[in-house]
Image (cartoon, grey):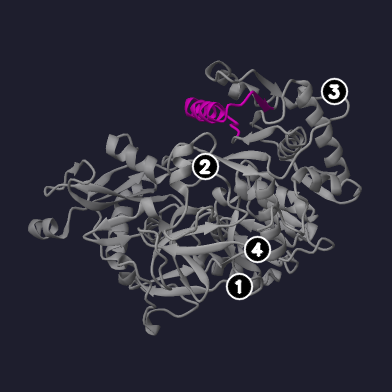
Amino acid sequence: MRAFPRQVAPTLVEAVRELADDRVRGFVFLRPDGVERIWTFHDLAREAERRGANLAAQGLKKGDRLALVISDTAEFVLSFLGALFAGVVPVPIYPQVSFKNIDSYHATVTHVTRASGASMLLTTAAAKQYVDPVMGRVDTLRSITTVEQLDSDPGTLDVRVDPGDVAFLQFTSGSTSRPKGVVVTHANLAANAEAFMIDGISRNSSTDKGVSWLPLFHDMGLIGFVVGPLFSNVPCVFLPTASFVRAPRLWLEKIHEHRGTITYAPNFAYALVAKRLKDADVTDLDLSCVRVAGCGAEPIQAKALRDFAAKLAPAGFNPGALMPSYGMAESTLAITFFPLGDGPRTDIIDAKSLTRGEATPADAGLAAPDDAPAPAAIELVDCGRPFPRHELMIVDEAGRPLPERRVGQIVVRGPSVTGGYFEDPELTAETYRPLPGDPPGALPWLHTGDLGYLSGGGLFVCGRLKDIIIVRGRNYYPSDIEWAVGELPKVRRGSVIAFGVFVDSHGGVIDAGLGEEALVVCCEGAANDAAVIREAAGVCIAAQFGLIAHEIVVAPLASLPRTSSGKPQRRRARQMYLEGTLARARTMHGQNADDAARRA
């Protein structure tokens, strides 16, 4: 297997230097006030060199870690590249813009900074007040510096960066546990950039342009729209994430204005656009330029993509541009892409078969291709196929390959798969390991912890292995329950969390493993709608999944725990529920069917 791809530079530093003669094209950054500034590829290369020299002058050596807490997209990109030019390992951390929940934020920054052994924390003058308290909590941290202090011209930089060198540490978002640092090398970046930019979307450097609002402290935004485009010579436009959240139409306006051809977003963003935009909002847009509209990072719902395409049809949006995908930080970014131009493909399966670990197609009469599935069926989206030089399998608990339409753990290997977690050999050995029968010295398989199945060569993702809820021997996937409840009136979309707890014969919550597992559903809603929400959610869960929830909790708006990228934290919510600290409007114990019958 090649050490690095043929079609891109071996390191990101070399890729940027190869673009340095281009004084016209580059990255456009939109500020919150609406002003745009372009940094040409020439300017990016020159500024990265200057910032790298400044970091070296500050005493940072090759291999030292640099925590990056920068909200401004241009400053983040320039500082990230500057660190790479100096051989310094950047560690992106999400920035705080207010003192809300500041103690929790300090704990997160302290954890990531300490776990990475960072020597310096780089931020902005405006944000420094939010991270100053971290200084006295991390032994390795020598200084907190602002980008404004890197304003000198210390001269040339003489650092050699090789493909096997660590490029940066990508700390996971912490949706299931405390953040852990994935070690990403330049070779990993080069391999994945070739995979998704060239093999995946067949980029055309003369015509393609990316448009993104994704946060750069997570892998989809950083690798998908900074690293990949730099390796493959594609200019991009960057919007502030907060601007998109406030006004989703801005995303589409900038695609229209800049004639963007490539964009990407999680499922919730497509649903948000379809829900918030009115028909009049799209009449003056021309989105016929979009040839790739990728979707990933969270469970993909076919209805959200269908609704998005229907809403934007008057603007010339081509549904064939929608490209479901699957990936994770441990594989740098992308693992599978659906074939370009085919549009989403779905599989409508019998819900009961899925609880048995099988994916049996539902009867033809249960759902039509353009309709939402009937209660007895579940619709899953084809996330595509692995890239060339990469392998993917579905395996059982013993690591044995499973045939098509059997649900098991997704395992992958190839040049995009990273080497493990920073200074955590135990977790690395648990996650990256060979399968039975592999020859000595073979590349280990990344055990993703995700469940899925293969059908017709395509990957269908069901959920997380550790999040599965098992009731009376049947498996239920939280994401399916969350989406169904999130569709109900008065429930805030994307603000539903489902998890399992153990209860005794009297319905009391007890220690894990000592009783029967039961379902708890938490959803955000207004207090005066609590009774209606609980009743509707109970009916929905019973009709679609044949379950009676142990408890349905209606929580105040914006109160459920989330990761820095906005994903609900199931394990944190479960822990808060067990501790009795989960905020709620009013609650109702669902009890089981026998209890309900006795009360009747």
Q: First in sequence: mark 3 or mark 1?
A: 3
Judging depth in this view, the residue of 190 and 171 nearest the camera is 190
Q: Position of residue 470 (x, y in %)?
A: 27, 57
Q: First in sequence: mark 3 or mark 2?
A: 3
Q: Are marks 3 and 4 in contact (CB under 8 Å)?
A: no
Identify residue type, mark 2.
Ser
Looking at the rendered structure, the secondary structure element under dot 1 is loop
Distance from disc 1 to disc 4, alpha carbons, whole Å, reads 10 Å
Taking the image as shown, residue 355 lies to the left or right of residue 410, namely left
Q: Position of residue 8 (x, y in %)?
A: 77, 55
Of the residues tagged 3 and 4, which is closer to the observer? 3
| Mark 2 Cα shell of 10 Å, populated few (<14), some (14-19), many (≥20) | many
Q: Which mark is residue 173?
A: 2
Q: Position of residue 466 (x, y in %)?
A: 37, 50
The stretch of residues the image draws in magenta is 95-123
Q: Where the C terminus falls, by quadrant?
A: bottom left
Q: Residue at label 1?
A: 343
Q: Which mark is residue 105?
A: none
